Amino acid sequence: MTATRIDWVREHCQLLRGIAAEFARTRPFAGLTIGTGIHLEAKTVALLLTLRDGGARVISTGNLNSTQPDAVSFLRAEGLTVIGEATKDAQEHDGYLREVLAAEPDLILDNGGDLFARYLEHPYDGLIGGTEETTSGRMRLEPLRAQLRRPILVINDSPIKQFAENEHAVGQSSLESYLRMTNRTTNGEQVTVFGYGACGRGVAASFRGGYARVSVVDVNPVTRLQAHLDGFSTPPRAAAVAQADLIITVTGARDVITAADLPLLRDGVILANAGHFPAEIDAAGLLADPAVARTVEYAGDMLTLELRDGRRVHLLARGHMFNLAGPRPLGNSIESMDLGFALQARCLEAVAARTVDETSCVVPVPGPIDAAVAASFLDRKYPPAG
Ligand SMILES: NC(=O)c1ccc[n+]([C@@H]2O[C@H](COP(=O)([O-])OP(=O)(O)OC[C@H]3O[C@@H](n4cnc5c(N)ncnc54)[C@H](O)[C@@H]3O)[C@@H](O)[C@H]2O)c1
């Protein structure tokens, strides 16, 4: 018998498998439509099928530049509605998101605040609330609380998501993706990580584990001190940029690396972004700069900018999240996503059951859900005696 990679992933999403079996009995989403705008890849397939097993009509689209065709075909074959295809075109993607909202979902599972922000442009009565996956989405939705006035639970702000996915898994997948995409060594290379939040800590630690010399740049001096005490160098920004063989941005902010940095960059430097939005490295600004003589597009989502003075600057995935890009992208580990998606399923269940109300608008996952998911994971590793 042969099976696909999606089957492998579903097999190892053990928390979701348990929840799907329970949901098939309890049907928490019976009669409800869930609209989703989240990366469509193997692990999200497992999540969306879990919601379907709970009785939901699921209407999904992906995020910019991360939709995997095999995930789309799998979901469609399972009878779920998937809007659109993989695209790097923001306007096209905007159309897909609006199509999801046109179905007036009762619950929204958002990633980056794309659906909730557009919902506010054309609100409808039936929206109960939903979830938001990321830091970037929380930052976007916090100022909109007064307009949203619905329970929206932020998965990112669970301690489990912070340490399991952001720290450990993004670090590992960034290193894995760098090696897979470039086939270049990390040993002895100077890596500069912009941002020392949960993700940056993991990225810095993983590249140190790959025998790189790692420096950290963070706008927050307290965080810079933490990086220093963790053993990373924290030179001034200009020096950190000028020394780097590889620069990774993972801040959640815009324009972290721009054309203004071109004069500083070493010949052969590689630029990569692991932050959610493709705005951390201003790819369009770099490409349009008069210092760029020509570009070379390599297979596998790598682009070289040849500068008039002979230096070359390489850009991975044109500034989109490189740990979900390149040939055969795997993203974050199955276990880390299984934990995060178990939180998603339990939070959507709580919103559907109205056990959280509008006072829980853009707030972290409730503590009892964190505790139950953590206990469930550990119980599978160390089954209770008897
Ligand atoms: N690639 C992935 O798989 C993945 C997974 C989870 C989260 N993310 C994304 O990664 C990004 C970072 O997430 P996080 O949880 O680490 O966020 P965080 O808020 O914990 O940390 C961000 C850090 O960046 C710093 N920062 C902000 N602007 C900066 C700038 N211009 N220069 C240097 N430092 C700056 C902040 O001071 C902070 O320490 C977000 O966009 C998030 O959505 C990506």
Image (cartoon, grey):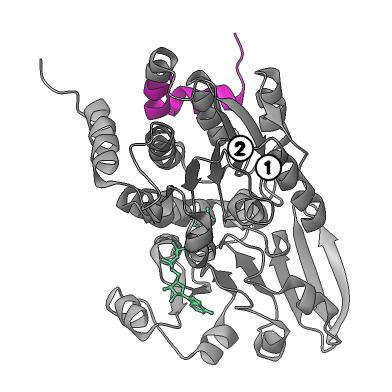
Residue 280 % position (x, y): 62, 71
Image x and y of residue 227, in percent? 34, 76
Say which label, 1 or 2, has the lower sequence index.
2
Residue drawn at point x = 64 percent, y = 78 percent? 255
The label on residue 101 is 1
Residue type marked 2: Gly
Camera-side residue of 113 and 255 = 113
- Residue at the (66%, 54%) spot, across then down: 118
Furthest-front residue in this view: 125
Element on which disc 2 rests: strand
Label 1 packing within 10 angstroms: few (<14), some (14-19), many (20+):
many
In the picture, the disc for residue 35 is 2
| Quadrant location of the C terminus in the rendered image | top left
Please determine whether, in this image, residue 117 is positioned above or below residue 10: below
Quadrant of the rendered image containing residue 356: top left
Whether 201 is drawn above or below 163: the answer is below
Number of residues whose C-alpha sits closer than 10 Å to that of mark 2, classed few (under 14), some (14–19) or many (20 or more): many
Element on which disc 1 rests: helix
Tell me if residue 355 is in the magenta stretch. no
Residues shaded magenta? 1-20
Q: Is residue 289 left or right of residue 130?
A: right
Residue 228 located left or right of residue 236: left
